Image (spheres, rainbow, N blue to C red):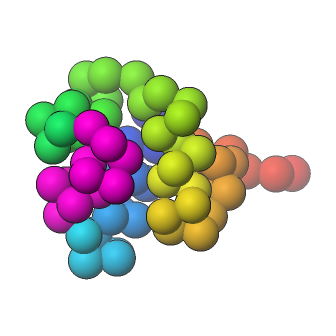
Amino acid sequence: MKYVKIMRDLREDHDLTQEKVAKLLGTSQTMYSRYERGANELPIHHLLRLCEIYNVTSDYILGIQKQ
């Protein structure tokens, strides 16, 4: 799951804590941590919100390369 590393890297590049991102997503820090570890699948509505927060596409977060 390439996206878990990308999610963590984006968060760290924006100097955000897991707690802050979780609050922006409307979830708990514990659940967000599970997303970053790949223990839980990231819901689409959270993926879309992360795109807004970081101003990136869903393809970027998911690690989809266009050929």
Residue 52 shows in the view: yes
Q: Is residue 66 above or below residue 20?
A: above
Q: What stretch is highlighted in magenta?
A: 17-27
Q: Number of callouts in the render?
A: 0
What residue is drawn where x is 49% and y is 53%? Answer: 50
**Left or right of 6, for residue 59:** right
User: Which residue occupies the foreground of this view, 5 or 58?
Assistant: 58
Whole-percent x, y for residue 56 in the image: 62, 64
Snapshot quadrant of residue 28: top left
Q: In this view, does 54 lie above or below 21?
A: below
Snapshot quadrant of residue 39: top left
Whole-percent x, y for residue 60 in the image: 62, 55
**Magenta: main secondary structure:** helix
User: Which residue occupies the foreground of this view, 3 or 28?
Assistant: 28
**Left or right of 18, for residue 35:** right
Farthest residue toward the right?
67
User: What quarter of the picture does the N terminus occupy?
Assistant: top left
Q: Is residue 19 above or below residue 38?
A: below
Residue 37 shows in the view: no
Whole-percent x, y for residue 17 in the image: 18, 63
Q: In this view, does 32 lie above or below 63?
A: above
